[in-house]
Amino acid sequence: MGKSEAVLFSISWNACIQCGVCIAICPQELPFVSDFDTIAVHTPCAIACMICETICPVSAITSVLRSA
Ligand code: SF4
């Protein structure tokens, strides 16, 4: 209790086809977008629903759990 966790996302840029699905499905209220029209990769995500990682059609997204 009291310990929050967040994830950092990483994207394989060679695999990404910039379809925009990860952004479209993201439940974050503020834009959670990278310079390459994918979900943000350097901003810890506290929701950590992992839907983007699941829905990416080319499995380009991976995540690392970290303490926040
Ligand atoms: S869902 Fe996957 S392929 Fe589509 S923009 Fe996001 S990272 Fe790229």
Image (cartoon, helix red, strand yellow):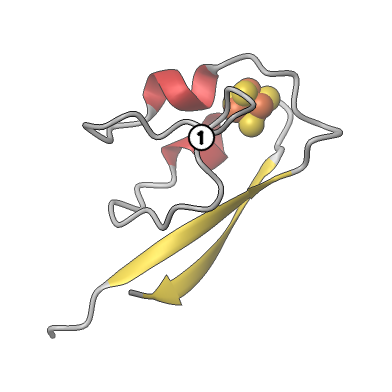
Residue 57 shows in the view: no
Q: In which quarter of the image is the C terminus?
A: bottom left
Q: What residue type is labelled 1?
A: Ile
Q: Closest to the observer: 36 or 27? A: 36
Left or right? Give the position of 4 relative to 17.
left
Residue 4: give x, y in percent of width and height.
24, 74
Left or right? Give the position of 26 relative to 33.
left
Query: Is residue 50 positioned above or below 32 on the image?
Result: below
Please identify the residue farthest to the right as the structure is shown: 14
Q: In which quarter of the image is residue 20?
A: top right
Residue 21: give x, y in percent of width and height.
52, 19
Q: Residue at x 50, y 40 (%)?
A: 40
Q: Which residue is drawn at 59% across and 29% down?
A: 35
> Quick check: is the Cβ at mark 1 less than 8 Å away from ligand 1?
yes
Question: In the structure shown, which secondary structural element does the residue marked by tag 1 occupy?
Answer: loop
Query: Is residue 6 positioned above or below 32 on the image?
Result: below
Residue 49 shows in the view: yes
Residue marked by disc 1: 39
Q: Which residue is drawn at 45% across and 74% down?
A: 66
Q: Which residue is drawn at 75% across and 19% down?
A: 17
Please identify the residue farthest to the top as the structure is shown: 19
Left or right? Give the position of 24 relative to 12.
left
Rendering quadrant holding ligand 1: top right
